[in-house]
Image (cartoon, grey):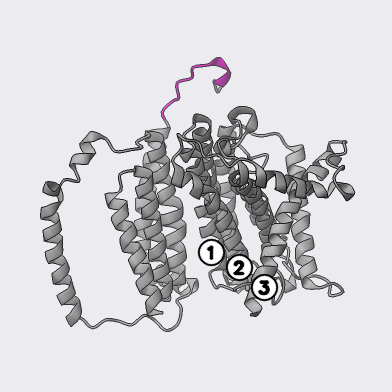
Amino acid sequence: MDMFFYIAALVAIISTVMAISGRNAIHSLLYLILSLLAISVIFYLLNAPFIAALEVIIYAGAIMVLFIFVTMMLNIGLEREAEKKWLEPRMWIVPTILAAVLLVNLIFALKNVQTIPPDKEAILPKQVGISLFTTYLLGVEIAAILLMAGVIGAYHLGSQKKKVKHRFLEIK
Amino acid sequence: MKYVFIIAGILLIVLSIAAGLIWVERRLLSVWQDRLGPNRVGPFGLGQVVADTIKLFFKEDWVPPFSDRPVFVLAPGILMITILLTFAVVPFGPDFYVFDSNIGILFFLGNSSLGVYSIVLGGWASNNKYSLIGAMRASAQMLTYEVFMGLSLMGVVMMADSFSFCKIVEAQKGGWFFIPQFIGFIVFFIAGIAETHRLPFDIPEAEGELIAGYHSEYSGMKFGMFFVGEYLGITLISALVSTLFFGGWLGPSFLPPVFWFLFKTFFFICVFILLRASLPRPRYDQLMELGWKILLPLSLLNLLVTGAILIFLK
């Protein structure tokens, strides 16, 4: 099982790097979707099939479709001149060094921490639901209020009266 | 070894149904429109499928120079893969399934939400305004209908107490779910039609206004994959309706369970074709209104009432 984990992790890392360094917006998004799918495989291997399925349905299936939808409408296509400058060494060398320091830090920290082995039994949707609505009820409700704010905001933006340009399309 | 036979058998059944549907649809449509349909090639015109397939194979497979080549080639494959993968969790009989997952329904929903990419990317990569409009319509339509496609199934999940298709079929031994879950059944069926973008909800391809929409640049076997993918989608939704609401392979024991499953599936395929023959296409905003203002509240209400009754009966 460990081998599957390393394969999925490798796919996730490579596709994320490709997503960041890609020059075509839609291709980058496709790599990002691939990376999300790889992460979902990792969740599945950690005996959390429900979370794996949600990762695919919500992140890869719904949110990324909206990203692609917007990118499609903006008609970005290939990079512009300004974007080429962002990939010059001057721009990325300092963040890379800082991130490398953090990585070394993380590796040393992980060596000393006791790792928790994944659960032997798969965690089924029912258990996830029960713990969401008992232990983590407050979190669920806060998330619901946040979503409600989104719905109200969308309603406010959409409630403006549409300018009708043709008499056939007028709503009486 | 047993798995290889099962996988090969399911692939054979599914792909031959999907190919055969091209003929079935044309003959049934002509029955309902009072004409004959294709009846020249072979007995009852059955050879028409073979002729069409051979024609598709020998057509020039042209990739437009202005298209985004890798994405253009990838798009039809995504559709086929996502739909064929979903058949892995559908039980064709008591022991005739590839794998019984305890997240079966979620597996189906995940695959169907990934299937959206095929159409969106196909339309975008074609670099053609009609295709792009088709892709935009498709992504909005499929995102909308996916929301309550999942919600409408939750009533079934609550009644069967499981996400696994096999357990759902077994839970229907006392009675099929389409009676207690009638609203769920109607909502799922409508959402299924919209997911497979079949008439009357074929707005992404609307040939009258968008000249085939997202696949107008496709030719040869790439077009064939979209074409067969649509029929595979119909087969999948029909199979799921019969599994989730009409008892799947359950039926009187004088015939094998696989027969009952295929019989019910075929019945719903015919309903799909009848809908195509009889209903006009709605306008785009009407489709969205139906989705958000009627079907979504209905499925939420169904969820609430089912939950309340189940708790009351406990």
Q: In this view, does B73 lie to the left or right of B153?
A: left
Q: Label 3: which residue?
A: B6
**Tag 1 subunit:** B
Q: Can residue B151 be seen in this view?
A: no
C-beta proximity under 8 Å, tags 1 and 2: yes
Reading the chain from its start, which is encountered first: label 1 or label 2? Answer: 2
Q: Which of A9 and B46 is in front in this view?
A: B46
In the rendering, at what x and y percent does residue A31 appear?
A: 37, 53
Amino acid identity at mark 2: Val
**Tag 3 subunit:** B
Within the magenta stretch, is there residue A126? Answer: no
A67 relative to B266, above or below: above
Reading the chain from its start, which is encountered first: label 1 or label 3? Answer: 3
Q: Label 1: which residue?
A: B107
Q: Label 2: which residue?
A: B89
- Quarter where residue A38 is shown: bottom left
Q: Can residue A170 be seen in this view?
A: yes
Gap between marks 1 and 3, in whole Å? 19 Å
Magenta region, residue range: A160-169
Q: Is residue A5 left or right of residue B179?
A: left
Q: Nearer the viewer, residue B208 or A19?
A: A19
Classify mark 2: helix, strand or loop: helix
